[in-house]
């Protein structure tokens, strides 16, 4: 019996209490559930925010026509409230894994730009499109790609403010290793990005906007990476910015 006591003391000093392992496992399970909840929340929040763009556009048109202004004003206030809730959800979430289907990039771009027509008109922003990518098909998740494109387009519109140009260009390039890439360039004539901010624009929670969440460009980067692509930015203060998304051609 005497030989067992020293060993018991050594184990007690070097090891953890017996209850530590079950507690650790439970904490890991809790973190896993929170991560899954985050993925679901991000998916829902993005769909809400994208849908709200179309609804807001429709309400704005009704207000211009003077049709039931009181009701339209009430709907618009509620839409802002819902948008705020969705934004809060995005602060604690991230995109769901991308599905893999054949999608047409030009179709997604056109749909996204149609949702922005009213804002572009109000801000006197000229839209230029130059679709040179043939074919324009990639493998991926249409909804997630639209989320990324919408974030980049919103970014451009906000950077311009008013009386500028927003340009969307697509092209097919071939890398040195023979891999073909479909590139989408989003160019704006805004104030540009300062050199000290340029390396940080894709970092989560980094923002120079007063009410920004700092998640838009981080989500764009994650979506692009999940589709096997890359995203880059080129900018000089006073000369606007160009965000380039590169995706593997199907």
Image: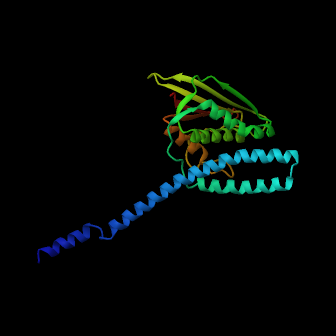
Q: Position of residue 204 (x, y in %)?
A: 56, 48
Give left or right: position of 9 versus 139: left
Task: Give above or below for 235 relative to 35.
Answer: above
Question: What is the quadrant of residue 5 in the picture?
Answer: bottom left
Q: Answer yes or no: is residue 235 visible.
A: no
Q: Residue at x 37, y 67 (%)?
A: 23
Residue 1 coordinates in the image, percent (x, y): 11, 78
Task: Give residue 241's quadrant in the image.
Answer: top right
Residue at 64% over, 42% down: 151
Question: At 81% from the left edge and 44% from the top edge, which residue is drawn?
Answer: 61
Task: Please state which of residues 189 and 136 is positioned toward the viewer in this rendering.
Answer: 136
Q: Name the spot of residue 8 as percent of width and height, x first.
A: 19, 73
Give above or below for 56 relative to 34: above
Image coordinates of residue 208 in percent, x first then y, are 65, 47
Decide if residue 169 is on the left or right side of residue 20.
right
**108 relative to 80 in the view: left or right:** left
Question: Does any portion of residue 52 appear in the rendered image?
Answer: yes
Nearest the eye: 89 or 189? 89
Picture colour scheme: rainbow
Query: Which is nearer the eye, 77 or 162?
Result: 77
């Amino acid at each position: 019996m005497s030989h067992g006591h020293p060993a018991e003391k050594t184990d007690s000093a070097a090891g953890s209490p017996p209850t530590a392992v079950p507690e650790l496992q439970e904490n890991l399970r809790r973190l896993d559930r929170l991560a899954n909840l985050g993925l679901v929340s991000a998916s829902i929040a993005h769909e809400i925010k994208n849908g709200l763009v179309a609804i807001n556009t429709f309400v704005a048109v009704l207000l211009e026509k003077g049709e039931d202004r009181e009701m339209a004003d009430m709907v618009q206030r509620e839409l802002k409230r819902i948008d705020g809730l969705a934004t809060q959800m995005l602060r604690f979430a991230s995109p769901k894994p991308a599905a893999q289907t054949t999608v047409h990039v030009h179709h997604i771009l056109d749909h996204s730009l149609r949702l922005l027509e009213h804002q572009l008109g109000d801000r006197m922003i000229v839209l230029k499109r130059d679709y040179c990518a043939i074919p324009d098909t990639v493998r991926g998740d249409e909804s997630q790609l639209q989320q990324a494109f919408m974030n980049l387009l919103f970014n451009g519109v906000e950077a311009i403010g008013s009386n500028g140009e927003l340009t969307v260009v697509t092209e097919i390039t071939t890398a040195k290793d023979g891999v073909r890439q479909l590139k989408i360039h989003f160019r704006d004539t805004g104030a540009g990005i300062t050199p000290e901010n340029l390396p940080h624009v894709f970092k989560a929670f980094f923002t120079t906007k007063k009410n920004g969440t700092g998640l838009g460009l981080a989500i764009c980067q994650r979506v692009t990476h999940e589709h096997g692509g890359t995203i880059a930015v080129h900018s000089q203060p006073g000369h606007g910015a160009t965000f380039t998304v590169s995706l593997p051609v199907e």
